[in-house]
Amino acid sequence: MRPWFGATVLVSIAGLLSTLVCAGVARADETMASDAIRPGVDYHSFANVADFRVRHVALDLTVDFRERRLAGSVDLTVERRTQQAHQLVLDTRDLDIRSVEIVKGDAAQKLEYRLGSGREILGQPLQIEMPAAPRTDDPVVVRIAYRTQPQASGLQWLTPEQTAGKKHPYLFSQSQAIHARSWIPLQDTPQVRVTYSAAIHVPEGLRAVMSAAHEPTSAKRDADGLTTYRFSMTDAIPSYLIAIAVGDLSFHAISARTGVYAEPSVLGAAAKEFVDLERMVATCEKLFGPYRWGRYDLLILPPSAPFGGMENPRLSFITPTVIAGDRSLVAVIAHELAHSWSGNLVTNATWRDFWLNEGFTVYLERRIVEALYGTRREQMEDVLGLESLKRDMADLPAADQHLAIDLRGRDPDEGTTEVAYEKGKLFLQFLESRFGRVTLDAFLRGYFDHFAFQSIDTEQFLDYLRANLLSKKPNAVSEEQIHAFVYEPGLPGFAVMPPADVFTPIDRARSRWLAGVITTAQLPTKKWSTQEWLHFLDGMPAELPRARLDALEQTFALSNSKNAEIAHSWFRIAIRNDYTPAYPSLTGYLTTIGRRKLVRPLYEDLMKTPRGAELARSIYAKARAGYHPITQASIDAIVTPQR
Ligand code: BES
Ligand code: ZN
């Protein structure tokens, strides 16, 4: 090592270099929103991507359920991008680093490293002193021996009691947005894409799955009683799509290239619920171009999963709360599948550009729903989405209502709202209305093709849009209109709204029931879809008399609904009205389900009254240990009194 080259000197050189390069990752001291935001700069990573790029990640990890740790090593294939670069900076959070070395065949050379000062949201930079290289284009392999800590924010370790089968433990990862760094030291920014491979050693009787292809030699029994599974992902993906799960998993094929993994006791219901999987893939291919990832499987997680779904490539992770028994919530599957185009093929370069992932995906999702389940169903989902967007926007500061949002200094998990999803979708809907479907579909196919396996920012998309769509019909859309969607708050007056009348019969039924014109038994609910039920419940006035609540509960047993979305909407009404008969079921719901979108509003509602707050605290005391770290962080902020 060059003795006089102290770490601080190197940090400032790295800082200087990244200021000179306009795209890339921010300097570590530049996470606050003081200066103008620079498009394309990732303020949520320490990685000095202008100096070094990781190209391949090779994991060798043992899954230790007793200690709740992954332990082993990662080999990073690293490309040097500038001659002057001497320090490789990686992202980490709560990792125990054992050693860092450079390996070449059988030879290894130890490298100096240190963990820099931490930041609450970003974790800690791992600064590695790299030997001077004769040539810049020779990639080197950096091997890091490490283990994770039990509280790793990107992993959830479940006891057997928290699973469906109650016999085996379960582990799953959730790397988006910036949690990959809590289980792998790497350049944790979506603008760096890597291929990856993995050898995963698990206790006997358990199966490992990843967002990658199984190697045919998989599932070898080791001498020490562990089983090794091998994986490889040969397409370059951003770090947030690296994913793993381990548990008592069985598989059910739906078609030659699609299927479901789940615990054995859940598999039958899951296979029935998702019979349309192949049709969904085929529909999306017809609209937006070939599915480029080989297989498409689903993994059904335990109910503590923090999200409805996560689009891990080749293997979407799915909450079991989507299994309603009547396939009424499968839009989530269409959504995660659609990410195989919008998000996984063409990826947001920074979390400011998250709407490129989610807004496009909601648009694609609705197109799949329309093709498979009809226009009415699609319109209902549109209206529910719009209502949810309006509820979100009512509480959001103006700057957070732009499509491109400034998340500097904030955890990107907390900054994601319906704006990226539903306002993003409305932007594409607007383009569709101006150019027609045929033209927009062709444009989107071209877009996915042009940027396939690349990460882009908002401005790159807008340039491509101007050149390849707007120019086709020069007066159809103005720059002001684009600006209004992307850089201004609220919904533009010229946005194209879904037809307001799809729920008219439901609104009428609710009004007549509220006015006492019809009784509860006379509500025409027999043929109501889940979407109609949700609209019926979400549109209730803030206050309802006890007798009305009793009538709803006695007639429809809403507290015990098997449909997690309907139960959620009902519990919101119950909490607002302090309807205590629903509380035992509410307690059961909040202590089993950990999906943030379903539980967070319930805690928020409870915290609005002193009695509710007391209940929230007592439920949370029981529920917290079973929640995923991401859900814990969100609910802590609501329930734990701020000092
Ligand atoms: N990619 C998201 C989940 C996500 C977003 C994880 C941000 C971490 C940070 C996923 O595709 C998603 O949007 N899931 C939705 C379901 C969808 C139907 C809107 C969810 O979890 O509710
Ligand atoms: Zn999504």
Image (cartoon, grey):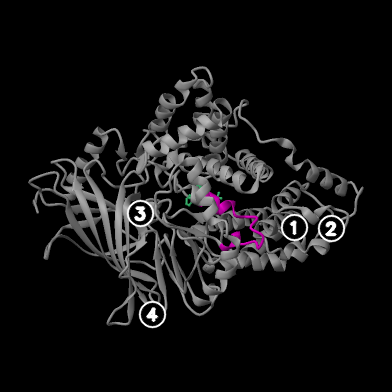
Separation of disc 3 and disc 2 at Cα?
49 Å
The dot on residue 123 is: 3
Residue 558 appears left or right of 37: right
Q: Tell me which label, 2 or 4, sits earlier in the chain.
A: 4
Q: Tell me which label, 2 or 1, sits earlier in the chain.
A: 2
Q: Would the CB of label 4 be found within 8 Å of ligand 1?
A: no
Camera-near label (3 vs 1) is 1
**Residue type at numbered disc 1:** Ala
In the image, residue 125 sits, relative to residue 198, either above or below, namely: above
Separation of disc 2 and disc 4 at Cα?
54 Å
Toward the viewer: 308 or 98? 308
The dot on residue 204 is: 4
Separation of disc 2 and disc 1 at Cα?
10 Å
Badge 2, how many Cα within 10 Å: few under 14, some, many 20+?
few
In the image, residue 354 sits, relative to residue 54, either above or below, namely: above
- Report if the CB atoms under discs 3 and 2 are less than 8 Å apart: no
Residue on which disc 1 sits:
574
Number of marks drawn: 4
Instruction: Please say whether residue 325 is one of the residues in the magenta stretch.
Output: yes
Badge 4, how many Cα within 10 Å: few under 14, some, many 20+?
few
Find numbered disc 3 in the image and state the secondary structure of the residue it sits on.
Answer: loop
Badge 1, how many Cα within 10 Å: few under 14, some, many 20+?
many
Q: Residue at x 21, y 50 (%)?
A: 88
Separation of disc 3 and disc 1 at Cα?
40 Å
**Residue type at numbered disc 4:** Glu
Camera-near label (4 vs 3) is 4
